[in-house]
Image: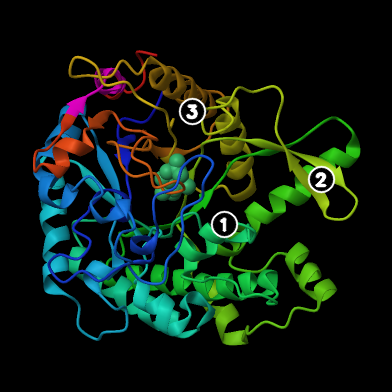
Amino acid sequence: MLKKDFLWGGAVAANQYEGAWNIDGKGPSVTDVMTKGSVDHPRDITEGVIEGREYPNHLGIDFYHHYQEDIKLFAEMGFKCFRLSIAWSRIFPRGDEKEPNEKGLEFYDAVFDECLKYGIQPVVTLSHFEMPYYLAHEYGGWRNRKMITFFIHYATVCFKRYAGKVKYWMTFNEINNLIDIDNPFNAWTGAGVLYKDGENAEETMYQISHYQFIASALAVQEAKRVDKEMQVGCMLHFGPIYPYSCDPKDAMASIKAMDRRFFFSDVQVRGKYPEYTKKLWQRKDFQLDITDEDLAVIKDGTVDYIGFSYYKSTTAKFDKENDFKEVPNPNVPKSDWGWAIDPTGLRYILNVVYERYGLPMFIVENGFGAYDKFENGTVNDNYRIEYLEKHVLEVLKAVDLDGVNVLGYTPWAAIDIISASTGEIEKRYGFIYVDQDEVKQGRAGRHKKASFDWYKNVISTNGACL
Ligand code: BG6
């Protein structure tokens, strides 16, 4: 049985749904210079906004002008919480200003008040793929230590302004995406960094991560100073990487592959660098800017809970050169975007992570991106219901049978939004269908899918209907 106050809800990120990218003083974010891509064509990252190119995040789904009707629909589903992010560049358009943009602050006041009116608790990420473009362009993003000061100023302004309205915060969305240095999407959206030719990207990645660890730890400390009740979590992408086979070498490969995911939570939860990372730095002779003072900050700013996303799992096979290589799992089906569908993986990761850290777990993303067919004013998205149902059943097992402390579940996404990796609206996740053409014509374009009523029932019975 789930706790009575289990936080059922839905999740989104500002850059993917707000739109209004240059309205009321907002500055461009790193995502505002990303063009539309597709399943087999990556998004381009352009130098500024170029006329004639298509930037889907500029319009999003125009939540900025439709937040009242959208939140009303979330309330109708019975949401207890709503996970959203604050667009950093709405508060600090360039990122290095002293004074915040009052209009931006007012917008989130209005959104949070609207949520609270219905008893919906906002759960807020401070940095979700949307740092100010200016900071990336002029300062080199998180390769620059100055980012810590800018971020803490921004975080402190938010904590002070929204104290009493927001209890649950997260610092950096999927901070561990940074580990994958081969895909430019990760360093750009996560840190405003594009690796240069000839640069040791891996060494830079550890430096960037270090600065973000300090910033995150300082944010935890600052939140407590503002309001002792605030809970600040880390946010990681947690998909299990199983051993490909029972060959002991594959089992070891799986541990090495998972170390790369856990490195980030190990630091943010335990407050110190793990031994396996220190050894790696020694072996590779990485020279990082890490001071004793930094390490003390990291030690004193450990997180209160673990927020994480779960979409898919994969497997690791032994590889002589790199310890392991990731290979697809032949035992699980895939979505149209090639994402493995593995509900058991959610129970698995809840167990593994809870056993490792013993902190409350918050599933802040889980969902099924699919091509929806909009017919007769709705979408019969039984495939999405099936995906979510199977995953929630695994959460129930983790709670009832394994004793994992789960705070809540906010599927991705509360409503259709722009896909982060491809920039498509066609990769739909929501309980509410958004007709982009209607939005462009100035209408709301919101339509309930079959999953809307399904989820409403799940929430009202606290999962007992499954
Ligand atoms: C997570 C991100 O990685 O996955 C979200 O936190 C993202 O921002 C979600 O939207 C789903 O990925 P995509 O690429 O299908 O939108």
Q: Is residue 448 magenta?
A: yes
Residue under numbered circle 1: 176
SS for dot 3: helix
Q: Secondary structure at mark 2?
A: helix
Residue 403 visible to the viewer: yes
Which secondary structure lies at badge 1? helix
Is there CB contact under 8 Å for labels 1 and 3? no
**What numbered label is drawn on residue 97?**
none
Between label 1 and label 3, give the one nearer the viewer.
1
Disc 2 and disc 1: Cα gap in Å? 18 Å
Q: Is residue 410 a member of the stretch shown in magenta?
A: no
What residue span does the magenta drawing correspond to? 447-458
User: The residue under label 2 is which amino acid type?
Assistant: Ala
The amino acid type, in three-letter code, at marker 1 is Asn
**Residue that mark 2 sits on:** 253
Residue identified by numbered label 3: 395
Quarter of the C terminus within the rendering: top left
Q: What secondary structure is the stretch in magenta mostly built from?
A: helix
